[in-house]
Image: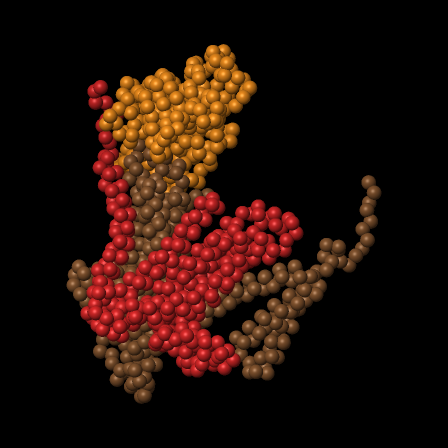
Chain colours: A orange, B brown, C red
Amino acid sequence: MSKRIDVKDLNVYYSKFLAVEGVNINIDAKSVTAFIGPSGCGKSTFLRTLNRMHEVIPGARVEGEVLLDGDNLYGPGVDPVTVRAQIGMVFQRPNPFPTMSIRDNVLAGVKLNNHKISKGEADVLVERSLQGANLWNEVKDRLAKPGSGLSGGQQQRLCIARAIAVEPQVILMDEPCSALDPISTLAIEDLINELKDQYTVVIVTHNMQQAARVSDKTAFFNIAGTGKPGKLIEYGDTPTIFSNPAEKATEDYVSGRFG
Amino acid sequence: MTSTLTPVRKRSALTKGQLPKAAPYIVLAVALVLGAAILALIGFNAFGWGIVSAILFAAGLVGWSLVVEGSRKAKDKLATCLVVGSFLVALLPLFSVIWTVLVNGIPGLLDPGFLSTSMNGVTGAFDNKTVEEGAPLVGGIYHAFMGTLLITVLATIISVPVGLLTAIYLVEYGEDRPLARAITFFVDVMTGIPSIVAGLFAAAAFFAVVGPGTKTGAVAAVALSVLMIPVVVRSSEEMLKIVPNELREAAYALGVRKWRTILKVVLPTAISGIASGITLAIARVIGETAPILVTAGFATTINTNVFSGWMASLPTFIYTQILNPTSPSNPDPSSVRAWGAALVLIILVMLLNLGARLIARIFSPKTGR
Amino acid sequence: MTTTSLTKSRGAGRAGDKVFSAATLAAGCLILAVLFGVALFLAIQAFPALVAPADKIQGGEGFFTYIWPLVIGTLIASVIALVIATPIAIGVALFISHYAPRKLASGLGYVVDLLAAIPSVIYGAWGVAFLAKEISPAYDWLAENMGWLPIFQGPASATGKTILTAGIVLAVMVLPIITSLTREIFLQTPKLHEEAALALGATRWEMVRMTVLPFGRPGIISAVMLGLGRALGETMAVALVLSSGALTASLIQSGNQTIAAEIALNFPEASGLKVSTLIAAGLVLFVITLGVNMIARGIIARHKEFSGAN
């Protein structure tokens, strides 16, 4: 249940402004890929184009191809809603639905789409998803309580459970730990390690140690200056990027000389 | 370190040239006594005592401050007196109105049958008897109460979908397009339409479409909707705007369609604020008189069909009972009925306002902590 | 390329999205249509009165002669209301925004909002049953001592049912409107400006005069305009309180009439050309209030852009 992503010559625009230019990248199935780079280099923008979430922002558009196991996400007749059901996303700040219980939050993707599901199936799905997000033991006694009553780290794992409940092929994570304390961060990193057995995971992070800890491959993005488009500078195996990068800019960044 | 010896002083340098802390209380006491004395000379009444004392208080405090503290502080004191004074003045009519309605309205409300009978068949002869022979007061507000209820419910049924959908368009689909900006501007303009013009519009529209002289509860409901829709739009728009974008994105990322996201995530999150805004909008139109006067006429009998025949309402009932008493020679029974209806109306409005606050509190998303 | 898993639509499909967004768009357009309809239907129904021969209109001298005393009467009542309400409203707004203790401020604001919640017909009833009676001695005094001013020319009305009383009732009704808007603007005064003034040793009043009032001026102007819009169109307070008559300079005699009250008093029994005449009067009122409101909204919108508020 996991697919690979191949990106060909992707440009991302906000209205007329070119935000990200000429990205080519091949992301393997069942792997963890980290995007690193300084603020404003377009890594989050690029991540959002991988499940067409950038279209939510008025004026945003792309040129190029994003292939999910060979199928172009931007091909004619492709519905962004279908894309997003196959490529899930976890955001920077935990955002459980405040009007729903923990259980309903997990079932949100199914219920909001009006799919009929029996109570027994729902129970199985809730338990499996929460187990998958390492949250089951902490919340199994209070599934009917509001999701917003959990701690920040638990909320974020609830959001991951919510994302995997719709059984996506790929999970995108946009700085999932930046609003969390170190203990919660560790829990999420452990979870990412387990998730890659079943899913393709792409994670944007500001934290280079985190990228080094969790990812198989790392992509480094950079911009030449304000107003210039962001570019993919280097992409390779994580150990190589951190210990023996090919580009000077990458070396400067991972060794802490700027950014 | 050397310990600094501060000379023991009665007053610090920082408080030199200031009025003592108790100054306002001293001046207030003096002003109250003086005020009472002055009023005693020209005939005492509580209202005059309050006014004269307030003026004396302000003059005394500012004058004293001018002597001790100088003109800048005195000006400051004067401004404070004026600002506080204007607030107190603003409260006067509020209390006066509520007091007047309570005192005059309770006798009518306590009258048996006041809430359960209509004015059907009640003529001036009955009222003359009530005044001249002490016969019990006849007639009531049942027909007006039902009319208000039906007209308001119909107006709500029209206004809420239109207003809410418009608010959704502005927040979720508008994206600052020219059309959205035009709607926003004209909704603002619509809030300023005089209520009688809204009534004339509904009347003119029905005269033109259905036939001259069409006056029914439904026409009144359309008139009230013109007044109610902009209020619903504005309040719902504010509430939808404060729903965090993150929730919408979370739903989109789960592969949920936009319309289902709006219906199942955005609206439930904002529902408490929207419901309270709608309740306030109802409270606003339930007391409207002029638009009903020109669209539903005034009936003395119970009419529960909004699509046919004239219909009474509480505000028009109050209006006609005061302006055209049932018995022109003995207007007191009509006045009792009018104030009783006014009390009922004000209770309704206050309950709706209170309800709006409760709804906002009870249905707001729970944190569960 | 073959049909892929991505081109299969799922869920309720795209139709739901289309229908829903079309419904919201239709609702928005309906509002524009209604406003358009207000103008259109009033114009259609008013047309006969505008073209009718002069002697058929009430008064026998044509529509213009009929309407202008009403316009003047409406303006007199509204100006009285604003002259009374504006200073008090600014005072109340300052009290709530800068003088009252923080904890009390929102509660006090709610009390002032209650003034806006009371239905206009009840204000009218209060005006005629309480205020008019209580205030008529004051009118006698004004007539005696200030009678040399045309506006206080005696003999004062014995019932107190004068345009001045109606103006006072209107003032009470527009007070909460002006207050709530100016309060919002005052609260938006940049804290830095206020603190800068206080740090220079300004007293509280000097701080208010140097920072809050200049910052709030456009807001005050537009709030007063909105209050004017409300006062111009208010019906019941005038219809119940004023003992109407011909245009009179004295504010403490009976006489004068406003457009809104004229319509309310005559429309229920009107028929034929009289209906058209009254609807035409309503059209005039609509145009006046529309103009006032648009100017007010324009000022607010421009001010918003400059201050960066919201």
Q: Is residue B178 above or below residue A122?
A: below
Q: In the image shown, does B46 or B75 lie closer to the viewer?
A: B75
Q: Judge left or right: residue B295 versus residue B84.
A: left
Q: Judge left or right: residue B54 versus residue B117.
A: right
Residue C294 visible in the current orientation: yes
Q: In the image shown, does C243 or B280 lie closer to the viewer?
A: C243
Q: Is residue C5 above or below residue A237?
A: below
Q: Position of residue B93 (x, y in %)?
A: 46, 69
Residue A105: name its quadrant: top left
Q: Position of residue A123 (x, y in %)?
A: 32, 34
Q: Position of residue C83 (x, y in %)?
A: 47, 66
Question: Which residue does the image show at 61% across and 79% down from the upper left?
Answer: B37
- Image quadrant where one finds the N terminus of chain B: top right
Q: In the image shown, does B245 or B57 lie closer to the viewer?
A: B57
Residue B285 visible in the current orientation: no
Q: Judge left or right: residue B95 versus residue C289.
A: right
Q: Give the number of marks.
A: 0
Q: Is residue B227 above or below residue C141?
A: above
Q: Position of residue B199 (x, y in %)?
A: 27, 63
Question: Which residue does the image show at 39% across and 26% down from the upper left?
Answer: A18
Residue B113: name its quadrant: bottom left
Q: In the image shown, does B129 or C305 lie closer to the viewer?
A: C305
Q: Is residue C24 above or below residue B276?
A: above
Residue farthest to the bottom, as pictured: B133
Question: Which residue does the image show at 31% across and 88% down from the upper left?
Answer: B133
Question: Which residue does the image show at 40% across and 37% down from the upper left?
Answer: B246
